[in-house]
Amino acid sequence: MTKRPAPPDTPWDDLNEAGDGLTVNNFLTTRLSQLTNALRRELTTSYTEPHGLSVSEWRLLSLICHAGTIPFGTLVVQSTSDKALVSRTVRLLQDRKLIDVHPEEPGSKRKIVCAITPKGRALHERVIPKARATQAQAIRALSNSQRAALFEAVAVLQHYIDQVAQERAATTKVANGEARRTKRNASPEAAKARNP
């Protein structure tokens, strides 16, 4: 491993609320997206591709293996992927007999659960040692204080974005309620009721 580079000057030090002077290249979303894509490309694929797995397949296989059995809706939430991608990936894993998919309750067609198969567990057990070692190597590129700071920063940002999502959901709910009331009040029936 090469010597750690000196920490760069950060354009975020004296950042005001308006973000004056902040360029797109230094947006938090841009920096994290670039890093995540590079990590996925250089690290994750090094242990998924030799086993014929895409990154999405590995992520879901790992979540299902860890849980043993998991409701599809929970899998979507935990994967942080969109429902359509999870659905396609689940079908691919099922076609390879790495997971089994069945109704959550007998006769239910809407709610399904995903369960790891012996073949899926065996594949996971072959991949996970290399995955852990590869991830550990990347984490160890950071000093102990950098690791702690990054772990804490990710937790703080996750808490922040969870709050933003809750506020947005509440605002959307209120706006949708007002839109429905306005639509009802604008209907011909409502007009007749106001002007008999």
Image: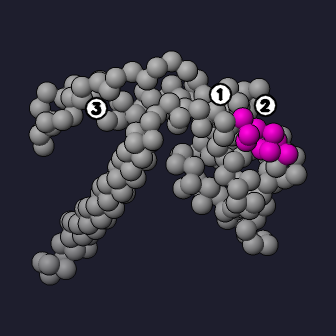
Q: Is residue 17 left or right of residue 169?
A: left
Q: Label 3: state its secondary structure.
A: loop
Q: Nearer the viewer, residue 192 or 8?
A: 8
Residue name at image x 66 percent, y 52 percent: 63
Image height check: is 17 above or below 138?
below
Q: Residues within 10 Å of mark 3 (few under 14, many from 20)?
A: some
Residue 147: image location, x then y, percent = 44, 42
C-alpha gap between disc 3 and disc 2 = 35 Å
Q: In x, y percent, where is residue 175?
A: 25, 62
Quadrant location of the C terminus in the rendered image:
bottom left
Q: Distance between the residues labelled 2 and 1?
A: 10 Å
Residue 143 lies, in percent from the top left, at 44, 36
Magenta-colored span: 122-130
The local crowd at label 1, few if under 14, some if 14 to 19, many if 20 or more residues have their Cα within 10 Å, is some
What residue does disc 3 label? 27
Residue 119 as seen in the image, left or right of residue 127: right
Report the residue marked by disc 1.
Answer: 45
The disc at residue 51 is 2
